[in-house]
Amino acid sequence: MPEKFPRTPRMTTGAVARRLGISPTTLRSWDRRYGMGPAVRDGGRHRRWTVEDIAVLEDMCRLTTSGVSPSEAAGVALSRANRSRAVDPGPLPAAEARRAHGPGPGGGLPLGDVRQEFRGLARAAVRLDGPAMAGLLAALVQGHGLVVAWEEAIAPTLHAVGRTWESSGDRYVEVEHLLSWHVSTVLRQAVGNAPPSPRDAAPVLMACVPGEQHSLPLEALAAGLAERALPLRMLGAAVPAEALAASVRRTGPSAVVLWSQSRHTADRTLARQVAATAFGVRGARTRPLVVLAGPGWGNRAPGPGMLRPTGLREALDVLDRHCAAVAGPLTSSAAARRP
């Protein structure tokens, strides 16, 4: 006879793993270490997960994405599940309430521990959890500021994912691509949301050298410049030398940032040519400051008319001071922020 009431749908471990974006091995590990297994096993051995079981796992994934350690996340998720089944759960103890707070507004942790958020971003990337990455990245930039978010969370996550891809025989390339897309999105949003820069000020022209495709660090610098209300023109990845030279002559920039990720793309001859490019009216011609950005330029001393900052914060400070000196104090970003 057919059952009077249908059984609760149950999913295999593989199906649950695909739904959550984690490996079946991770699910079995959570079961063994933290007791996160299904309430019922067919035949006493095979795991079959109900909707309620999966809800607990989803809660744990949200917590680990926010930077909570797996062991602590498991305790909080199981506690929440047990209390939701209770008739009168009552108030949580204070210590557990702080842990169970978990993700704050927008899915991120209450701000304060950027390293914890870095771990959460890496976990979300590995799971291909786009919405979680978007929320965490936005919360990082808004809560900690662009420089701290980039130097302590975003760049380390990109490096970690890149190392994993390189050491695993081209596995996880999809993780790097999705993470890069979300990072680029939040950086461009930061540029779009920044205060307007003076329209008559000479811009900072930004370009990756020919053959250089890694543009995310340059986009981070662009977001930092926009945050300081400094005018910029972003040319992006792998700009041909002829196009770069034409752009310098047409825009008359106060500075040109040349990004090189690898020593194979760093072209010092091109940098010298850009530094020697003069523009403006006869008798008052000027040349741009050339900023050599990125590890590809190495530690060699820059040539005349060039600077070699060692990081995002230093590059922003150098360009801020230079733009203020070129444009005058009334149009500098410091003056724009003066009450």
Image (cartoon, helix red, strand yellow):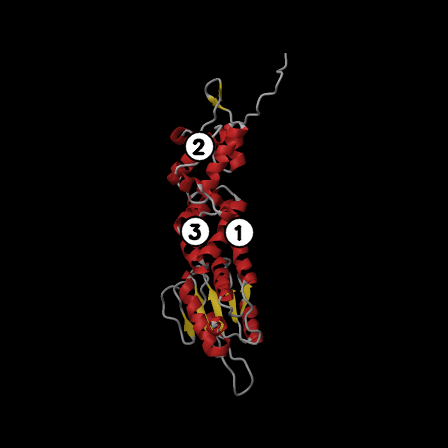
Does residue 209 appear in this view? Answer: no
- Residue matched to label 1: 182
Identify the element where label 3 is drawn: loop
Residue 83 image position (x, y, % from top left): 46, 31
Amino acid on which the number 1 mark rests in the picture: His
Amino acid on which the number 3 mark rests in the picture: Leu
Q: How many labels does the image show?
A: 3
Q: Which of 219 and 152 is in front in this view?
A: 152
> Mark 3 touching mark 1, by CB under 8 A?
no
Identify the element where label 1 is drawn: helix
- Residue matched to label 3: 111
Q: For the point 43% across and 54% down, which residue is it?
A: 155
Q: Is residue 321 left or right of residue 248?
A: left
Of labels 2 and 1, earlier in sequence is 2
Residue 30 image position (x, y, % from top left): 42, 32
Identify the element where label 2 is drawn: helix
